[in-house]
Amino acid sequence: MSRAPLQLHIPAPTCRPGDAVDFSGITVPAAGILKRPAEDTPPEQMRDYAYGLIRVLDESGHAVGDWNPKLSADTLRTGLRHMVLTREFDERMVKLQRQGKTSFYIKCTGEEAIGVAQAMALDDRDMLFPSYRQQGLLVARGCPLVRLMNQIFSNTRDNLKGRQLPIMYSEPDYGFFSISGNLGTQYPQAVGWAMASAYSGDTRIAAGWVGDGTTAEADFHYALTFATVYQAPVVLNVVNNQWAISSFQGIAGGERATFAARAVGYGLPALRVDGNDFLAVYAATKWAAERARSNLGATVIELYTYRAAPHSTSDDPAGYRPADEAKNWPLGDPVERLKQHLIALGEWSEERHSALIAEMQEQVMAQLKEAMSYGVLGDPAPNDPGSMFEDVLKEVPGRLLMQREQMLALRRKEV
C-alpha cells in the first residue's frame, strides 16, 4: 500500500517584508464580553478565559463590562503620565546609543501599559522578577531615571559597577530583581521567592514576566509545576508581543493554542488580556494578586500585545516583518487608547496631552544632564579592575585576596 510522504510543518508568519500587512487571522472580541469571575473560582471552570480576551476599553474609548476597575480620573492620569515618561525615556536612550554614549538599549514601545498598569495594581512591597522590557515597573514605582541612566552608561555612579549589560537593571530598593540575559530564569526564581514568602508567613506576593518565545524554555514549565504543586502566591505573566527577536510567536507554539492555555494542563487559572488596554491589564493583575493574597495560588496572565520597536538596538525588524505592521496592529497604541479614554470622560484634552509630553521630555533631559555628569560609556574610564573581587562573596577567600594583590602589584609596576 502506497503512503503519502510525511511532511514537516514549519511555522511561518502571514507576511514578510514587502508584503501587505495581514492581521486577518486575529479575532478581536468586543470589549466587556467576558464576565469577571470571583477570585476563588476553580481553575477548571475558567477555561474560556485562557482562549478569550479580556477587554475593557471599547472602540470609542469608553470603559465597559464587569472587568472595568472604575479607577479615578487622577489614577488614570497618573498611569498616562508614567506611560508617556517611559516612552520618552526610551526614545532619548536610543538616540544616545546611536551617538555611542552606550552600547545597547531595548525599548518597550507599544507595551507601556503592561509595566505601568501592573506596577500600579500590585502593592509596592511585592517582589518583581522582570524580563528586559518592563522598565515601566520602575517608572511607576518612582525609581529615579538617573539611576537607570547611570547603569545604561556604566558610569561612575552605576550601582552595578559595569558588571551588567545596559538595561539589565537591579533595583532591590524598588523590589525589582536583577534582570538576567538568560531568559526564563526569573520564572522559577519568582515562584521560589513566593514559596519562601508563604513558608515564612509573610504577606508579600511575587510577579514574574517572560516573553512568548521564552515559554518554550524548560524554566517556564518548571515554574508552573512548582507554582501549582505548592500553591505559590505568584502572578506569572507572559508578554505575547508576537515576536521573539526575529522569530514570530508561532515558533514557540502560538499557532496551536494561546500561551495562556498552557496553564490549563497545570491546573492553574489563566487570563488572556488585551495588553494595550490599561484598564484591562490593571483589572486582570488586581484579580490575580488578590487570588494569590487569599492563599488560592498562582495565576498565569497572557498579555496580548505587539512589539512596535526593534527587539533591541542590535536588531533591524525590516528584515523579517513589513515596515508598517506596527501601525496596523488591531489593538492600537496603549498610550493613545488611555488618552482617548480620559478625553471621553472629559478629564483630558489634546492640549493637556501635548503639554504632558513636553513636561516628560524636560524631566528626561534634566535627569540625563545629571547622569552624563558622572560619565558615559568609556568616559571616564571604567571602574577600577580591582572591584571585580568585590560584591560577589560575603567573605573573600584567601586565594582571591592573593590574586587581587598580584594584580595591584602588576599595575603598580606598569605605572
Image (cartoon, grey):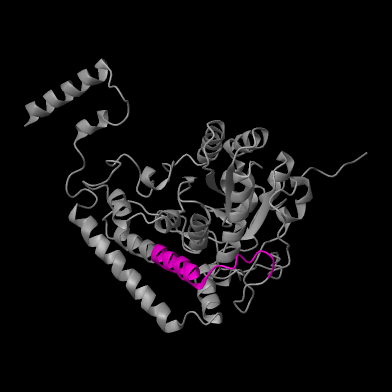
The front one of 43 and 317 is 43
Check the image and report above or below for 42 versus 277. Answer: above
Q: Position of residue 118 (x, y in %)?
A: 52, 56
Q: Is residue 329 visible?
A: yes
**Magenta residue check for 80:** yes
Left or right: residue 290 compared with residue 307: right
The front one of 201 and 376 is 201
Check the image and report above or below for 70 versus 158. Answer: below
**Which residue is drawn at the image coordinates 61% and 76% (left, top)?**
62
Q: Position of residue 332 (x, y in %)?
A: 57, 71
Q: Position of residue 153 (x, y in %)?
A: 27, 51
The front one of 66 and 104 is 66
Q: Quadrant of the N terminus?
A: top right
Q: Position of residue 22 (x, y in %)?
A: 64, 68
**Which residue is drawn at the image coordinates 71% and 39% (left, top)?**
266
The front one of 119 and 402 is 119
Q: Quadrant of the C terminus?
A: top left
**Magenta residue check for 325:** no
Q: Is residue 212 visible?
A: no
Counting every numbered tag in the picture gives 0
Left or right: residue 412 compared with residue 397: left
- Magenta stretch, residue numbers: 65-87
Left or right: residue 397 compared with residue 207: left
Q: What secondary structure do most residues of the magenta stretch adopt? A: helix
Residue farthest along the top direction in this orientation: 398
